[in-house]
Amino acid sequence: MYTILYTFFVLKLFQLANKLNQLLLNEFSVVLAYYAV
């Protein structure tokens, strides 16, 4: 029972981290492009 819950939690956390990572990468590219000009 707890194993399924734990797995779900870890998966959700992983998804969130992935979204955050993509957001940060996008922001970084925008800043980099801004300073390149």
Image (cartoon, rainbow, N blue to C red):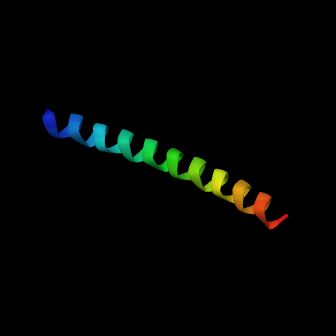
- At a point 60% along the width and 56% down the height, the residue shown is 25
The answer to whether 1 appears left or right of 13 in the picture is: left
Quadrant the C terminus occupies: bottom right
Q: Tell me: residue 30, above or below residue 13.
A: below
Residue 11 sits in quarter:
top left
Query: Residue at the location (57% across, 51% down)?
Result: 24
Q: Which image quarter: residue 10?
A: top left
Quarter where residue 33 is shown: bottom right
Q: Position of residue 7 (x, y in %)?
A: 26, 43
Q: Nearer the viewer, residue 15 or 33?
A: 33
Task: Decide: is 23 above or below 34.
Answer: above
Q: Nearer the viewer, residue 26 or 9?
A: 26
Residue plotted at (65% across, 51% down): 27
Q: Does residue 31 appear left or right of residue 15 in this picture?
A: right
Residue name at image x 29 percent, y 37 percent: 9
Q: Residue furthest right?
A: 37
Mark count: 0
Picture quarter with the N terminus: top left
Please provide percent x and percent y for residue 6: 21, 39
